[in-house]
Structures are given as C-alpha cells and as structure tokens.
Image (cartoon, rainbow, N blue to C red):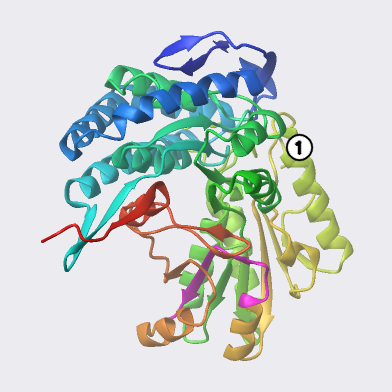
Amino acid sequence: MREYLQFYIDGQWVDPVEAKTCDVINPATEAVCAHISLGGEADVDRAVAAARRAFESYSQTSRQERVELLESCVATYEKYYNDIADAIREEMGAPRSLAVKAQAHAGLGHLQEAARVLREYPFEEVLGEHRVFKEPIGVCGLITPWNWPMNQVGCKVAPALAVGCTMILKPSEVAPLSAYIFAQVMHEAGVPAGVFNLVNGDGPTVGAALSKHPGVDMMSFTGSTRAGAQVAQNAAPTVKRVAQELGGKSPNIILDDADLETAVTRGVLHMYNNTGQSCNAPSRMLVPRARLAEAEAIAKQVTESMVKLGNPEDEATTMGPVVSEVQFSKIQGLIEQGVAEGAKLVVGGPGRPEGIDQGYYVRPTVFSEVNNDMTIAREEIFGPVLVMIPYDSEDEAIRIANDTPYGLAGYVQSENIDHARRVAARIRAGNVHINGASGGYDVPFGGYKQSGNGREWGAHGFADFLEIKAVEGYGT
C-alpha cells in the first residue's frame, strides 16, 4: 500500500494545509492500492507563492544552466524509470509492455527533446535596429489527465523548465502515483526550490483554484472538452493564457485504393491501444460501402485472435482494464445505446469479457452500419469501442470525417501516397496520420475546434510558455 499524503512545495515534501484522504484504486483488481491527500485553496496559495518567489531568479538563468538541469532530470528519470512504469501499471491498469515501452518512456522522451530543442532555440530575433525577445511567461498551472500520465506531465513540465518558467502541477487524482515519483525525480535532479511544485486534488477544488488564481500567469490543461471549457471560464477574469488539449472523435478514412486487410488490422489494433483511452484514437473507421462486409470480417478476426485481455503484470497481455468504475459504467452505457440505436454489433458488446469477474474490463467492441448521427459516432467513448461507417464517395467520406465538433487527429489509408496527401489536406484536424505513421517527440501535437488550442511537443511546445517582447530602438 502506497501512502503519498504530502505535497511537494518549495523544494520539500510538506503536509497539506487542508486535506482529506483519497483512495487510489487499482482498476485490474478493484482494490485500494494507495492513499493520497486532496488539497484545497490554501495549498494552492502556498504553492503559487513559492513559484512566484522562484520565478524571480529562475527566469534569469542562462540557456546552458537550463540545458544542464534538463540533462540532470533525464539522468534521474532513467534511475526511476522502472518505478514509474510499475506505478502506471498499478494506477491505471496499463499492461506491463505498454507501461514500460510507451507510457513511462513518454516522460523521458519529452525531457530529452526539450533539452535538444533548448540548445538551439531562437529566443531573440533582430528586425533592423529593433529586437524581439521571447521570455518566460511566468508561473504556470499544469493540470494533467490519467490516461497517459507521464506523457502529459512530461510534455508540460519539460518545456516550462526549458524556457525559464515555474509551475504547479495538479495530476489526476485517479492516477496520481507516477506523478508523485516524478516529483521525486525533480527533487533529486536539483530543480531549484519553488520551480516545480505538486499539489494533489480534484478539479472543482484545486483545479479551479489554480485556474482562478491571480498569481498564475498561464494554464496548460489536458482532459475532457467539458472540463477544459470550465478551466477557461475560471481563468477568464484574470486574462491568463489557457492552452488546452481536449477530446477527440478521430476519423480513419480507408480509401478505395487501400490494402483493406492491412488498413483495417492497423486501425483496429490502434483503437484498442491503451484500452481505447487515448484522445487521438481512430474511433470512427470510414469504409467504402462495397467493402464493408469484408472489413467487418477482418475486424472481427483481429479482435478475436490478436487481443489478449488479462492481468497487466502478464507479459502476454495486450489490453488491460479501463481506469475506473465511472469509466466502465459510462462505456457500458454507450455500448448499450449503440445497440438500441440500431448499429450492427460485429464483435464484443455489453458486459465484462467471458471468464473475467474482477476488474474494470470491457469487451473489445466493433459496431458497423453506423451513421454519423448515432450517439456512438458523436460522443468520445474513451474505451475499446470502434464504429465502422460506410461511405459511397470520397467527398462523402471527407464530409463525414469533418462532421464532428472535434479536430484532434485524422487517419488516411491508401496505397497511393499522393492520393493520401490530397485527402489529408482536406481533414480539419491538428494531426493527420498517413498509413499508420506516427511522429516523434519533435512533432507538434494538438487540435482544431473543440479539441483545444495551442500545441505541445518539441519546439512548437515552447510557444505557449513564452511571452513576446519587442524592444524598439535596441540598436544593431
């Protein structure tokens, strides 16, 4: 049993000013695996005050000093790498292979990339006799989700550190364990007191207090579109910057010249990755109507033969549980609604998988003959549920793809790269993947429309943490 009852503020672990204890549930066993404290406004005030004090000196550090600090963070993270992976497996049920190879690695990757970018990042621009400077924005409130905990912590903390900001992190109270270890990494790496602070809590209390706080200069939020809108509303009276990475209902267009077996297999397995709990998951598969039956058969075969549900500690497991009882119930309700609205159930369906009576496991599910007005085609299910939508023409496929309030990601499958590029250009989304390609930590990540604003990852991820100052008459 883990007991993580303190917060990390001003370079030390401290008892909360006001707190209540919260159970952390292992979703594979439904048992309590840890206790954390949920803080309040007084804890946020304390952390913001520490961050404001630290900003005075940290914002003036040199590029080289911050490069060396990030390199120290990388080395210390590597020391704790397996502990972080174990925590992610325990807090959110990620299979061991996913926790080690992807989930834990993401935090390391963002620290490494920030150090690389920082070495050459152009903080100054000469415009004749004038000079434009990019300066750290100030104290940053960082709110991160439970589905990719270290990815989202890393892609916010790393650029903030790199450009000279100070910060308060509020990780999800559903999966806070890896963030607690991350705070220990920051401490041992030598991050100056007050530069990085961690306060656990829920959104309506600690999240709202951060968003409203006049001492916080910007908010970086990842989570649902509903919660992101609330953060923006809370932040509006103080006119602070708000960067958001929100929900998605991403289309996966399989063009008529694609290798159908390869494209469907790739799309199904990608949908099931992380138990479908990814905001950019290719959850709407658009298939030429004449080939829909063939696509259904491939999806069913892939689901039944290539997906191994089970204990996250088992190396053979490819899919673990969803993160919580709340998520399990929501997904079950949407699956039942899909059936009620007349979608064709190809595989899976309501209820736990056969032979599993413990843990928040969802049957990997594929619906077909879905139209884009159905609830399962509109709402972000955030579970292993794929909907297949037939189309009659390429223009119709693109229209359906863009007929969503979201715009985080899109996917295009074609044997003809020029054809795929033309279609990709017409998709209204922040990230479009051709034939399963995925960018590295240097490629910007973020969305259009209600999927958010701003960009994370790599050099583009620095921008939201910087202010622009023009000094006119600076001289040559």
Q: Is residue 50 on the magenta stretch?
A: no
Left or right of 451? Residue 230 is right
Residue at x 35%, y 24% (from the top left corner)? 186
234 w.r.t. 75: above or below: below
Relative to the observer, which residue lies in front, 375 or 171? 171
Instruction: Residue type at mark 1: give it.
Output: Val
Q: Position of residue 475 (x, y in %)?
A: 14, 59
Looking at the rendering, the stretch of residues picked out in magenta corresponds to 402-414
Q: Position of residue 12 (x, y in %)?
A: 42, 12
Residue at x 72%, y 28% (from the top left corner)? 358
Quadrant of image for the N terminus: top right
Can residue 101 be seen? Answer: no
Picture quadrant of residue 41 = top right
Left or right of 107? Residue 314 is right
The total number of labels drawn is 1
Residue behind mark 1: 326
Looking at the rendered structure, the secondary structure element under dot 1 is: helix
Left or right of 474? Residue 296 is right
432 w.r.t. 86: above or below: below
Q: Position of residue 37 (x, y in %)?
A: 63, 16
223 w.r.t. 406: above or below: above
Relative to the observer, which residue lies in front, 55 or 109? 55
